[in-house]
Amino acid sequence: MAAVLLALGIPLAVSVASAQQQKVVVDRIDDTARFASLAQFVTDACSSTRTSTDERLETLSSELDSYYGVYGIRAGVFCRTGSPMAQAPKTFFPDKGEVRDAFAEALLSRRSHDPKQVWPWQRHRLVVASPVIRDGDVVAVVVTDSPTGALRSRILHGWLVIGVGEIAAMLLAVGAALRLTGWVLRPVRVLDATTHAIASGRLKSRVAAAGGPPELRRLAHAFNEMADNVEDVLEQQRAFVADASHQLRNPLAALLLRIELLALELPEGNEEIASVRTEGKRLAEVLDDLLDLALAEHTEADLHITDVGALTAERVAAWTPTAEAKGVRLVGNCPPTTAWADPVTLSSALDAVIDNAVKFTPKDQCVEVTVAADGDTSTVVVTDNGPGLTEEELARVGDRFWRSGRHQNIKGSGLGLSISRTLLAAGGGSISYGHHEPHGLTVTVSVPRNSPRA
């Protein structure tokens, strides 16, 4: 639009300037023609033997004086030799510059050429000359020399009108473009927000397929269908895991009962029966964790402003007897700090992390739990002095059913941290892992201090 306006505005501005100057030139031509008609009948004015004053010459001189006095335009009638017949002011002569060129052109029995175009930033004068012809011969020349201040002001005013018009058209075009792009992009913004909502776990989010071009309305409809299908697939997966876990618990409970009955018939301390009993109980724990994971993936976080320091201190106190029984010192530094969190979810996550830290920390070593506020998040950092994990293991920790090959003999299902990560993510929180020098693991649980939904 700007290019079109420039392409139209520049020629229009040049045309306005040319039209204004042409109007002035035509006026000057009319004036010189009138003075030429008066000078045509002045007798003997250019004769070197003139002895009397012609009444017409006095009239011509009076007209030129009035013309100069009223309009400020220098004018004169000059003989072929350049001597003045009449002039105003008396210092005006065709002796230099554009005045001399116009005078010489008129001596050839034709009006002088049109003056050069005057622009607002120039201070040129406008010179027009016409011949005085008597009996077919040029006997004198009428010359006018006009100031261009008024002409330049009119040109500038015309340009300002054009500029204001183009600015108004540009603003109108920008307004129309903003409305158009807003109409086109509004569904895209809604689609973007809904995509982020689904990616963050709010699977019920959908796009309102209203407004915008037909293509985007069709895209919104297709997106909603895709989201419905994805939600159905995830729901079927969750239902399958939950149903399978639930259905397997009853046969497993019966199997464990039969194992206990069988153990009564065998000598006490039978290793095979003890091994089967241990594996059965481990399988029961795995099924319980699977059911918890299936529920966690579709649980909405119930967020409240929570005192993270007090909650962490409570969990440290709850795990202290377990740590002391294992010979591990559990130390908590839990200053008051608030954040948006689901207290049940945060407690479960801290239980899983502290349990792992105590479980893998050798006797007479220390587990430290530190609460801090870091900008927009509150963090709970749990560090231990256990064997730690390699870089490859750090990349996999928290995956479902994953356990380090060095710790397969330690009790656990490999689902606790995965469940914690899923529950925390539903409320905008996170859990991360790193090395603790010289050895051990650092686990950081983060929850937002500002409401994630806001």
Image (cartoon, helix red, strand yellow):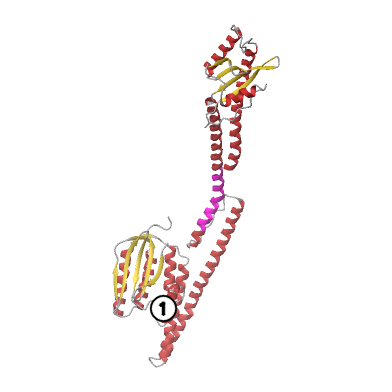
Residue for point 60% across, 50% down: 213
User: How packed is label 1: few (under 14 Cα within 10 Å), some, or many (20 or more)?
Assistant: some
- Is the residue 44 above or below the residue 346 in the image? above
**Observer-nearest of 244 and 233:** 233
Query: Which amino acid, by three-letter code, is at mark 1?
Result: Gly
**Observer-nearest of 274 and 266:** 274
Q: Does the magenta run of residues contain 185? A: yes
Q: How many marks?
A: 1
Residue numbers of the magenta segment: 176-194
Residue 217 % position (x, y): 59, 53
Q: Secondary structure at mark 1?
A: loop
Answer with the quarter of the image where residue 25 lies. Answer: top right
- Is the residue 388 above or below the residue 122 in the image? below
Helix, strand or loop: magenta stretch: helix
Which residue is tagged 1? 412
- Is the residue 152 above or below the residue 224 in the image? above
Q: Does residue 218 appear in the picture of this structure?
A: yes
Residue for point 44% across, 83% down: 279
In the orientation shown, which residue stands out farthest toward the bottom? 267
Answer with the quarter of the image where residue 274 lies. Answer: bottom left
Q: Does the magenta run of residues contain 276? A: no
Residue 126 % position (x, y): 57, 25
- Is the residue 125 above or below the residue 58 in the image? below
Q: Is residue 31 left or right of residue 320?
A: right
Residue for point 61% across, 24% down: 102
Residue 347 % position (x, y): 36, 68
